[in-house]
Amino acid sequence: IVDLNRWQPLQLPVSIDQAGNLVTAEPTFLSPEWGRVNPFALVEADRTVYERDGYEYWVYHDPG
């Protein structure tokens, strides 16, 4: 692990996907977060908005 606060590829010696296929390469990056999904049980007061590199990202129930 190089930076705990950034996504990094993870390759396991043996990995099997949900369809039962052997995974031989490291997974690609899909998306950074779920923060912009409209919550059904959270309110705006539960959200903290952070900014990094000119982009906002939302965190709900941020533990600190």
Image (cartoon, grey):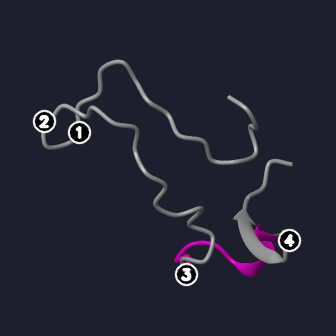
| Residues at marks 2 and 3, CA–CA distance in whole angstroms | 32 Å
The total of numbered circles placed on residues is 4
Over which residues does the magenta segment extend?
A: 38-50
Give the residue at mark 2. Answer: 20
Image marks 4 and 1: residues in contact by CB distance under 8 Å: no
Q: Where does the N terminus fall, quadrant-wise? A: top right
Q: Position of residue 34 (x, y in %)?
A: 56, 66
**Could you tell me if the residues under marks 2 and 1 are in contact, i.e. CB atoms within 8 Å?**
yes
- Residue depicted at x 63% and y 47%: 7
Q: Nearer the viewer, residue 25 or 1?
A: 25
Location of residue 39 (image quadrant): bottom right
Q: Residue furthest left?
A: 20
Q: Amino acid at mark 3?
A: Asn
Front residue of this view, candidates 17 and 9: 9
**Distance between the Cα atoms at labels 3 and 4?**
19 Å
In three-dimensional space, the C-alpha distance between marks 3 and 1, rounded to whole angstroms, equals 28 Å
SS for dot 3: loop
User: Upstream in the sequence, badge 3 or badge 1?
Assistant: 1
How far, Cα to Cα, is label 4 from label 2?
Answer: 39 Å
Q: Amino acid at mark 4?
A: Glu
- On the image, the x and y values in percent for residue 36 come to 60, 77
The residue labelled by disc 3 is 38
> Looking at the image, is mark 3 or mark 4 earlier in the sequence?
3
SS class, disc 2: loop
Residue 61, above or below 18: below
Measuring from the top left, give residue 45's x and y in whole percent. Answer: 80, 75
When asked about the image quadrant of residue 57, the answer is bottom right
Question: Is residue 33 rendered to the left or right of residue 13?
Answer: right
The residue to which callout 4 is attached is: 51
Answer few, some or many: residues within 10 Å of disc 1's Cα (few below 14, many 20 plus, some between 14 and 19).
few
Please name the residue shown 23% across and 31% down the image.
Answer: 16
Residue at mark 1:
17
